[in-house]
Image (cartoon, rainbow, N blue to C red):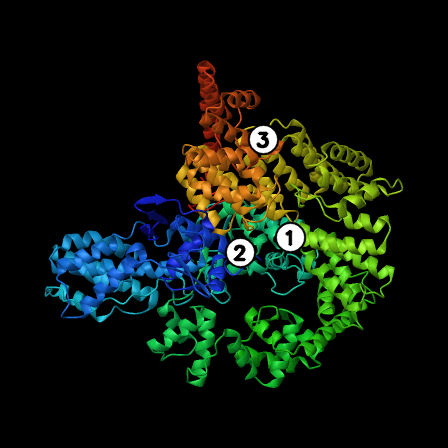
Amino acid sequence: MAVTRIGVLGPLQITIDGQRVPPGAPMQCAVLGRLVAAGGRVVPTDRLIDDLWNGDPPAKATAALQVYIHNLRRLFEPDRPRRARARVIVSESHGYALNLEPAQVDAWDFEQLLHGHEAALRDPTLRPDPLEQIRVLDAALACWHGTALETFLGMPWAAQEAARLTALRLTALELRARAALELNRPAEVVLALRPVFEEHPGREECARLLALAQYRLGQSLDALTTVRRCREFLNGEFGVDPGPALRDTETAILTHKVGADTPTAPITVRAAHPDPLPDSGYAEQRAAVLAASEAAALGSVRLVWLSGEAGAGKSTLATAVAAQLAERDWATVFGRCPEVEDAPPAWAWAEVLVELTAADPDACAAVDAFTLARRVVRHCRAAAGPVLIVLEDVHGADTATLQVLRQVVHWLRDRPVLIIATLRGTEAGAGVRDTAAALALFTADRIELDGLDLDGTRWAAVAAGLVDADDQLVALLRRRTGGNPLFVRELAKLVATQGTTDALPDTVRDLLGRRVAQLPAAVVDLLELMSVWGEDCDVPTLATAAGLTPDQIIDRVAAAEQARLLRTERGGRIRFDHALIRETVYHGIPVLRRLRMHWAVFESLSARICVPDCSALTGRDAETLAHHAALGATVETAERALLFGRTAARLCVERRMRADAVRRWQSVLTLHELAGHDGAAATDEQLSAVLEARCELVTALAYDGRHEQARDVREQALDLADRLGGVEPLVRAATCWPTPLIWSARDWHTADPRVLEPLRIARADTGLPVRERILVLVTTVFHTALTDLGDARAAADAAVALAEPLGDADLLCTAVNAQAFIAFVRGGFLRADKLKSLATRLLLVAAAAELTEFQALARYLLFRAALADADLATAAEHAGRAAEFATDGQLRHLLDALVPFEFLLELVRGDIESAERMLGDWHHEGVLGPAPLATQALPVDDVTRDAEALHIGLLLALAWVRGGDFSALAGALGERAAVAPELFSYGYALALLHCGDTAHARRVLAAAPPVGPPFWATFSIIRSRIALFLGDTDAARELYTALLPLAGTIGGLETGASFLGPMDAVLAELAAALGDTERAAAHRDDAERLMARLREEVAALRADVAHRTPPRPGVRGMPSRH
């Protein structure tokens, strides 16, 4: 069996028989890392899947995991006979385990050495002498070659294990220092412990040993300073004094009675957690936010993302910062994203505007997002000093809220404004992640509040009234709550009132449910009514709904406030103290009663608004009524509920909040089903209404980037159209997929006759209305361009000709979009004058009509064209504007496509290490978007939608600039080439050549499909390297002739996701191989001049960014932060 050694105390390293081997794809590495973290114990399959995909596994996660396990077994045991039992990664009935000796895994080896040493210290008969102690501890510390689990930073499962291993390393350093003092080596101790103490001033044993060493070197003042710094830190951060050992050491130094250091019991290791402050529990994090405010005060907008789970203290910290900034003459305003469905769009910004202007919130909510953003910006610019905007619960933000955030940040880029966005990171959707990526240029910090340590837990319990908690009880509180400040307080309140820990519930919901149950029945009734009504309410509304007097409501609210379940805000709005409380109350109501309560609220609101029908409803009223009607409808009332549901959904679409319309149209379809409108007895009118709702849902899902679901619903719409019969229903179902489209959004690997046949019939119908004909032609383009380019081009031209005289900007942009797609399919972005002309026209038409989604598309197309022309300054300008204008069109995909730009700039600049760090961070943090399974195919023009494929492509660019050796990527490229040969066959073949497997490489090349125009140039560069490697002069001559017109461009850059250096460098290699040294030299000179110019452009971009906004390490975005 091969001798295997795995290293995780630093970057992941695998050594087999003394040779370093590449660990494989990132998810494969994560599987191995998770098994290492288990310490040889079996990890159940379900737990492994949950950890690897962060609680959100894909449908085929088990199959994917089996592939990763298979690849790892093949890596560790390449000669294992087929079907023989694996010996390194073993299978148990319910999971997997890593079957290695401790000495074969550095983390296990380190722990075994350290724990063995501690055991020897505790046994007087085995206690080693100081020299032996140092030998053992040096061997343990030699296991480290970087940060614990460095490759897996950012993965939730690795954080706790990394903190534990880091704490053990600090313990080992302190134990070694103690042994060195016994050998009278104080200088060695000072050199070793001074940097440790600077980073961890609260470690008392470190401070004690350092002070003793300093004293022995005659540095009494330094020794006392060390003790004083430790005391001040403990006192200021935790409100506690140092322990007896450190106090005794200080006294001995002051009285010059320091003797030999007496060995003490081994140090107890605790996990590392953020240091709490008495008021918010997070001193370091508050300092970081205040640092961002100082940067903003200099005159440039800064954004801080403050994340943590429910109750982690986000609002408390933000409020503490706001209070501190208010004392410095900052204007501070707050807005909260409602955590209930069907709230008005951009409601948080309406609250911000109310605080800025004292306007009516309903009036603010009634305007569109663009106007709302302009008003906020206008009032921020008019402010006398700096402005702090706190947006709370951004994980629940709708598309409009995120759109306003992007626009406000861009438009206030030169103003002293700080925006704090609080969110639950685990609940943040793709829209929030995309917005964070788009605004990375302006991001000052991303702060995670991940729980209090034991001292912070003790403080939170005392603050809640549990003043006499011992260490065991504090540890129990922390274990039950994970250090969540809210949950700690809630549990502590229950313990304080009942006097026993036996009654502690297993979950916070159980706890909150019990607290609610202890209240008087009248107060519980009020809480239930409020939970059904929404997130907040006022006294008159509650009094009317409950049939009580205002005084009775006030009394019951006061009782709930005393129980810390409700709070009254300024202006008289009554709100649950936390969303989890509302959820606990709401889900505790029996389903049938909850149904009746929602309908009662609907009837009450209808009577108050006085609307006999839906024609005069505003957006907020329509959404609120539709919400309660949908949740309270029965078979008898479904028809009436449908009136309000359709109105709310249409209003959402009219305000261009199309992605937000998904829930509304899903609700409409549910009501249709409840009313029996899709049943066997349904009328044609009812079926037509269901068809409309399904088609609208397809549009909403597509705008939200949920293409698989959109296809499924479109299939249902086509089924229903067949049932109805006739051309019109089929056309409606076939053309319901929306534009703008950056690329194809369909499955191009198989034709879809169910769509193509209705399109054929509709094109032959001369009586089809003009609008429908245009949509038919455009849909035809996006379904036939890759198979019948001539027909698709004719359809696009005909659509534009029909749209031009109508004066409908939306339709014209849709048609021009189709023409641009044809231009892309025909020739990509290189030398693409036609495509640039169409993109420019699209931008002009969209800008004149304020169609932001088409402006975003046009800017993206111009960004790609500028990259193809090697014009980085223009590309950066278009990228920034595309991100700014991206709203609910194809926001997720457009922003994903823009993310690699900064990585490419780093490669142009020549900073390979920075690019590599950036790529690693993006991949682990999911910035590149979700990755499908390796078994899923993707369209040839769709690489940027597959995060794993995009990641591999960027790794190829890194390998290229490092010399072009692809061997380390052979495994990953092979997996992708199996499902997407048109994208990865040539890269895989070159990797095989670098691995020495020429025969396999030739087989891959022989089976490689032809490459279409969009990526022809990029893959031709890789083919050039293959031809040079194989000595194929005929292929080299052919490629030289084909690539020569592209001299002066950058290979791969036009894709927006690759960098293969100057095309002239490739031409130089080909010319040299063909014996033309003069041309080769000329090409090399041209390549050097081009790269020099591009590096100057990158430097100018960096200087411009630095001038506009103070850079901060770790911030990502477009253009780059440097």
Upstream in the sequence, badge 1 or badge 2? 2
Residue 1121 vs 670, above or below: the answer is above
Q: Which residue is mark 3?
A: 1016
Secondary element at tag 3: helix
What residue is at 53 percent from the left and 81 percent from the top?
514
Most extreme residue toward the right is 767
Instruction: Provide residue 907's location: percent of width, then percent of height.
Output: 45, 35
Observer-nearest residue: 813 or 884? 813
Observer-nearest residue: 1019 or 628? 1019
Q: Which residue is mark 1?
A: 706
Q: Please report contact status of discs 1 and 2: CB closer than 8 Å, yes or no.
A: no
Mark 3 → mark 2, Cα distance in angstroms: 33 Å
Quadrant of res 1081: top left
Residue 926 vs 122, above or below: the answer is above
Q: Is residue 546 left or right of residue 1063?
A: right
Q: Which residue is mark 2?
A: 63
Q: Is residue 414 visible?
A: no
What residue is at 19 percent from the left and 70 percent from the top?
122
Identity, as a three-letter code, of the amino acid under mark 2: Ala
Upstream in the sequence, badge 3 or badge 1? 1
Q: Is residue 748 visible?
A: yes
Observer-nearest residue: 22 or 1018? 22
Residue 490 vs 198, above or below: the answer is below
* Classed neighbour count for the residue bearing mark 2: other residues with Cα under 10 Å, few (<14), some (14–19), many (≥20): few
Instruction: Provide residue 134's location: percent of width, then percent of height.
Output: 17, 57
* Classed neighbour count for the residue bearing mark 3: other residues with Cα under 10 Å, few (<14), some (14–19), many (≥20): some
What residue is at 72 percent from the left and 47 percent from the top?
738
Instruction: Provide residue 204's location: percent of width, then percent of height.
Output: 25, 64
Q: Is residue 373 left or right of residue 1095?
A: right
